[in-house]
Image (cartoon, rainbow, N blue to C red):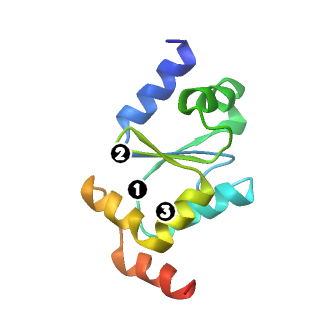
Amino acid sequence: MTDTATQIQTQISDNSVVLYMKGTKEMPQCGFSSKVAGVLNYMGVEFADVNVLADEAIRQGIKEFSDWPTVPQLYVKGEFVGGCDIITEMTLSGELDTLFAENGVTFDKDAADKIREANA
């Protein structure tokens, strides 16, 4: 495993929820990252954010690590979940709630319901 892959594995192992994104959860630097971080923030999910713009090795390494070509990328309990489109679909279908509940990740169910109501 490369140093970058080891670093990524450590980040994913040390945090229940990790979002590899452009920017930070407080200051996203692209619309897709903003959308996913916004959903997680609104739902009250505690998550580690990794700014791929701050480290070129991580920016390229995460794509190789997951075999997924784009950022953002969400990991829950060490497992790759998906990017913006997948997270959006999972949020609207309730699958994200189920994933969080099954993995012991605390989230605001009322907030998740409000997202679905607003998008119905």
Which of the 4 quarters of the picture holds residue 98? Answer: bottom left
Looking at the rendered image, the disc whose residue lies closer to the viewer, 1 or 2, is 2
Q: Amino acid at mark 2?
A: Ser
Of the numbered discs in the image, which one, if any, rests on residue 40?
Answer: 3
Which of the 4 quarters of the picture holds residue 75? Answer: top left
Mark positioned earlier in the residue sequence (1 or 3): 3
Residue located 41% across and 63% down the image: 96
User: From mark 2 to mark 3, how far is it between C-alphas?
Assistant: 13 Å
Q: Is residue 27 visible?
A: no
Mark positioned earlier in the residue sequence (2 or 3): 2
| Disc 1: which residue | 46
| Percent of width and height locating residue 54 | 69, 34
The front one of 100 and 41 is 100
| Percent of width and height locating residue 116 | 49, 81
Q: Residues within 10 Å of mark 3 (few under 14, many from 20)?
A: many
| Disc 2: which residue | 16
